[in-house]
Amino acid sequence: MAQTEEKIVFQRPHSLARFVTNYCPGCTHGIVNRLVAEVIDELDIEGKTIGISPVGCSVMMYNFFNCDMIEAAHGRAPAVATGVKRVNPDNVVFAYQGDGDLASIGMAETVHAATRGEKITIIFINNAIYGMTGGQMAPTSLPNQVTQTSPYGRDVSTAGYPVRVCELLSSLDGVAYLERVTVDSPKNIRKAKKAIKKAFQNQIDGIGYSLVEVVSTCPTNWGMTPTQAFDWMRENMLPYYPLGVYKDVVAEGYANAAEAAAARAAECPIAMADNPMLAELPNKRKVQDAMNKAQGGAQ
């Protein structure tokens, strides 16, 4: 009998280490970790990638990837990523953070890294709860959601409303790309991978700060089975955190975040006067159109 050649169609990404993770059964961190590793492999950047581990359920992520990794203090991953990227501008730097890490103790680092337009990639896991520390209310916990520190449900009159991170960051000029995805089905997993790959490619191309928010589940702290958790997420989280692209300067016709920011500032004389950034913009058409419009309106 003639031998037939076998073709590998599915295997562990090389960037994903052979290590037993600490994630709970049904947790979506494992899916997202794999997607990041697949993207690193496909872009052939493992040798130049530096990842920043957060504090949270993915605190031990430095064991899960074969690229260089750095552990950051709670919430400081964007600050660490900023330092690494500025010292090593040719490397690809990403931070992987949960909602407690990114949107609570690390909110200042998140906002300021974004508004500075740091050329880093952020993978943000939003499961609406503090996972590693036992299930306390997080900045993203939903109104009336029961947690360990809101046993009667989140009371917005005292705890305030949840933080919608993509919507919040979309107003900042330094941001190049924001997209919210989920990984509850094969179709959505493929969309999530596409978004993650775009966020990494944006960094490689020098377009600017990119963040992908992954709406996720926490079966253990929600007190549900994995299947129940996905159902609850679809019924409650996705209406409050709609999926989609929240900012994409390339899709708007700009070469990068700096060019888009210059166009938005065209009507501000002090912002445009002797702006050294203008000389570096690869595509000045939209910026010049905005400036001409502003000058015409001032006459």
Image: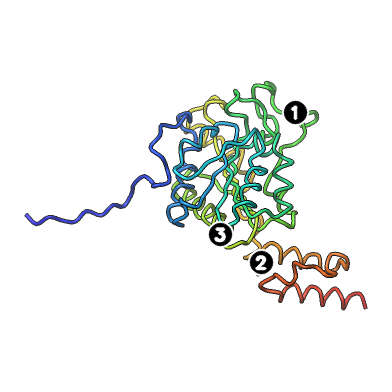
**Tag 3, which secondary structure?**
helix
Looking at the image, residue 100 lies above or below residue 259: above
What residue is shown with label 1?
155
Q: First in sequence: mark 3 or mark 2?
A: 3
Q: First in sequence: mark 3 or mark 1?
A: 1
Q: Position of residue 18 (x, y in %)?
A: 38, 37
User: Which residue in the rendered view is the most extreme toward the right?
Assistant: 299
Q: Amino acid at mark 1?
A: Asp
Q: First in sequence: mark 1 or mark 2?
A: 1
What residue is shown with label 3?
204
Nearest the viewer among 180 and 35 is 35
Nearest the viewer among 141 and 153 is 141
Q: Residue at image x 77%, y 33%?
A: 160
Number of labels in the image equals 3
Left/right of residue 12 with respect to residue 275 in the rendered view? left
Q: Residue at image x 81%, y 65%?
A: 265
Q: How many C-alpha atoms fall within 10 Å of the one at disc 2: few (<14), some, or many (≥20)?
A: few
Q: How many C-alpha atoms fall within 10 Å of the one at disc 1: few (<14), some, or many (≥20)?
A: some
What residue is shown with label 2?
252
- Of the 4 image quadrants, the one containing the N terminus is bottom left
Q: Position of residue 48 (x, y in %)?
A: 50, 52
Q: Amino acid at mark 2?
A: Glu
Left/right of residue 171 with respect to residue 52 in the rendered view? right
Q: Is residue 244 visible?
A: yes
Give the spatial CA distance, label 3 vs label 2: 19 Å
Q: Amino acid at mark 3?
A: Ile
Left/right of residue 255 with respect to residue 33 in the rendered view? right
Residue 89 found in image quarter: bottom right
